[in-house]
Image (tube, grey):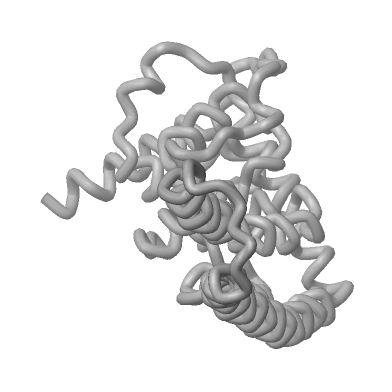
Amino acid sequence: MIPLIVILLGVTIILGVFIWYFHRQGISDSISDWASFGSYLGGTLSFISVVLMYLIFREQIRISYNSQFESVFFSMLKTLRELKTDVIDKEFGMLENKITNHFSVSFDDKNDNILPDTIRSIFSYYFNLHVDNSQIFHYFRYLYHIVTYAVDDKVLKKEDKKRYISLIQAQMSNNELLVTLFNVVSHNNQEYLKMLDVYQFFENLQSINKLVDNLIKRIFKGTEFKHFNNHSIPSVEEMDFGYENYDNEQFYLTLERINKVSNKAK
């Protein structure tokens, strides 16, 4: 659109200068004058033709490149879907349930004092504690390659990259998004985490509860979560969970254990 505006502006200036300079001389009846005028118009139109040919050629290159990119991209996306076997799908569902139960606690102001590094430690500890299937990590590695394939492209515009990233997460279920988020935080790859934050990868993640939503938003500060506005905070009675009962363990016990490990390390 911008090059076309530049062309029209250039033509307007060229013809405008010509009309302004010669408008007082009237219409000539000399063949040579008309021949000179035709040469002037011909030169102007030749310039326009060259610019238009360049724009058409550039657009063809862009379309061809996008076609090649999409061919690889959708092939990778298809492979990712194939990697999600029934076993992996069951693992995602199980982990989502465990995460929901584990962090199902009332929210209060003291959680605002938790530092991002502590949040990462808690997410990482809990995630690594419960992941039993090594195939799930192959899924995460392949997902990483698809995301970086789109984001690291040197030709695509940012809005195009956002569209491709949206296509990836649109095919993921909520339990995939949630468990993937825990995996990303667990590995603490800051470049990858920032990448997912910038392109709003987790924007469609469903709300867990006010506590978890708050912790997630403090890690992914640039993401506008669409479903984190209305929170239903469960009323949970204080229970004496043993440290071996990890499935039913509450968030506060994990935080307590993290603090104890940190104090011992000091």
Q: Is residue 64 left or right of residue 263?
A: right
* Farthest-out residue, right: 86
Residue 192 place in picture, x, y as percent: 44, 63
- Please give the name of the residue rendered at 61% of the width and 52% of the height, measured from the top-left corner: 27
Residue drawn at the location 41% of the way across and 54% of the way down? 194
Instruction: Using the rendered view, name the quadrant where residue 106 is placed.
Output: top right
The image shows residue 60, relative to residue 158, as above or below, that is below
* Depicted 173 relative to depicted 78: above or below: above
Quick one: 130 or 222, which is closer to the camera? 222
Position of residue 96 measured from the top left corner of the image (x, y, whole percent): 72, 49
Q: Quadrant of residue 219?
A: top left
- Depth check: 9 or 138 in front? 9
Query: Which residue: 50% across, 60% down?
Result: 184
Q: Using residue 110 as the reference point, say whether residue 42 is left or right of it.
A: right
Q: Nearer the viewer, residue 98 or 20?
A: 20
In the rendered image, the residue lying farthest to the front is 29
Horizontally, residue 3 falls left or right of residue 92, namely left
Q: Can residue 217 be spotted in the picture? A: yes
In percent of width and height, residue 175 lies at 75, 51
Position of 80 relative to 92 (above/below): below
